[in-house]
Image: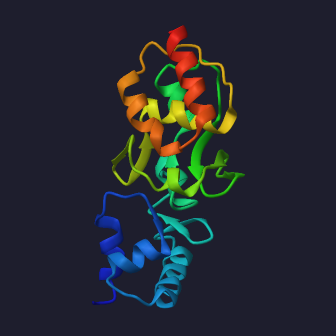
Amino acid sequence: MKKGEYLKIILKTDRTVFSVKDIAILWKDANTDAARVRLNYYVKRGYLYRIRRGLYAKDTNYNKMELATKISTPSYISFETVLIKEGLIFQFQDSITVASYLSREITVDNQKYTLKRIKKQVLINNLGINISDSISIASKERAFLDTLYINGDYHFDNTRSLDWDKVNLILPIYNNKRLEKLVRKLYKQK
């Protein structure tokens, strides 16, 4: 590959956020050390923006939802971020919430990201997860179950829009009797 083609390959993609591994795959180069050196050069020249260690963007106008799923992988957007968007809760939240293998809060470019730990067998199961434009996001039914699984008894402002058949289809991946009881209780209250 010629010298100027590396940057062109990044700029041509639809993605806005890249890890070093993503870029090494784009460049068809297994040597991530060489990719890091080249990326540092592009950042110093102003061609790319370093979001945080190991994560890069074409510029400062990157997709924050895309970044949310790149901070920790595997992960997907869920919990309050989806519940608010889908109208199941009405409380304001300024953080993007992500299901991950670890729990932590991170602030990047004045945006707060809340990573919530969920067990591996649930995290890697794609049932109820929609993937589009490099972003994995839970359906409202999956976010509903994730939230109940993590928080126990949780107050939802509106559960009428839930598809209870989908809820019951996704429920077995949690393998949790307490969660099953909560779902039955909430279904009766609907």
Residue lying furthest front in this view?
A: 177
- The image quadrant that residue 79 belongs to is top right
* Rendered-image quadrant of the N terminus: bottom left
- The image quadrant that residue 93 belongs to is top right
Residue lying furthest top in this view?
A: 189
- Give the residue displayed 52% in from the left and 89% down from the top: 33
Q: Point out residue 13 in the picture as x, y percentages from the top left corner.
A: 30, 63
| Type of colouring | rainbow
Depth check: give the residue in front, 99 or 148.
148
Depth check: give the residue in front, 56 or 134.
134
| Residue 168 is at least partly visible in this image | yes
Q: Point out residue 164 in the picture as x, y percentages from the top left corner.
A: 40, 22
Examine the rendered structure and indicate whether residue 51 appears above or below residue 179: below
Depth check: give the residue in front, 21 or 37.
21
Q: Point out residue 14 in the picture as x, y percentages from the top left corner.
A: 31, 57
Q: Is residue 62 left or right of residue 103?
A: left
Q: Point out residue 34 in the picture as x, y percentages from the top left corner.
A: 47, 90
| Residue 148 is at least partly visible in this image | no
Examine the rendered structure and indicate whether residue 75 appears above or below residue 145: below
Depth check: give the residue in front, 34 or 165.
165
Examine the rendered structure and indicate whether residue 140 appears above or below residue 70: above
- Give the residue displayed 61% in from the left and 37% down from the top: 149
- Give the residue displayed 46% in from the left and 24% down from the top: 86
How many numbered marks have been drawn onto this rendered protein structure?
0
